[in-house]
Image: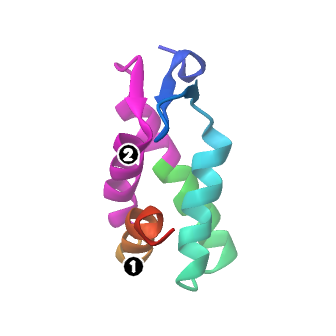
Amino acid sequence: MSQASQRVVKRKKHTEQYQRAKLHSSVQAACLSVREFTGSAEVTAEHVCNQVEQWLEDKLEVTSNDLRIAAARFLQQYNPSAAVIYETHMDIN
C-alpha cells in the first residue's frame, strides 16, 4: 500500500496524509538535539523513516501517537538518547 493513502489522526481528531518529510525532520531534529553529527542524523532519519513505512504498510489509518511511539522504537536502535527526546517531546510542549 502506498504511504500516500495512509491517514494520520492528529491529537485534535482531524486527519491528514502521512508525510515522510515531517517524520524525517522531527527524527533528524531529535538526533541533532543530542549532538549527533549532521550527516549521521540524516542517515538515522532515513533508516527510521524506512522502518516506519514498513510498519505502516498494512495500516490505512494510525494516530499521531502510534506513529510517534513506532518512530521512537525504531530510533532507539540507532540513538537511544535521541529516542527519549523524540518520545517525550510532545509531553513537554
Image colouring = rainbow
Residue on which disc 2 sits? 65
Residue sitting at 35 percent across and 33 percent down?
Answer: 55
x and y percentages locating residue 75 in the rendered image: 40, 61
In front: label 2 or label 1: 2
Range of the magenta residues? 49-78
Q: Can residue 20 be seen by looking at this rendering?
A: yes
The amino acid type of the residue labelled 2 equals Asn
Vertical relation: 39 (above or below) 24: below
Is 68 part of what is drawn in magenta? yes
Residue sitting at 55 percent across and 15 percent down?
Answer: 5
Element on which disc 2 rests: helix
Query: In the picture, residue 42 is in which quadrant?
Result: bottom right
Residue 14 numbered tag = none
Q: First in sequence, mark 2 or 1: give its number.
A: 2
x and y percentages locating residue 28 in the rendered image: 60, 64
x and y percentages locating residue 77 in the rendered image: 33, 64
Is 42 part of what is drawn in magenta? no
x and y percentages locating residue 64 in the rendered image: 44, 41
Residue sitting at 49 percent across and 38 percent down?
Answer: 12
The amino acid type of the residue labelled 1 equals Ser
Q: Main secondary structure of the magenta part?
A: helix
Residue 81 numbered tag = 1
Residue sitting at 33 percent across and 51 percent down?
Answer: 69
- Callout 2: 10 Å neighbours few (<14), some, many (20+)? some
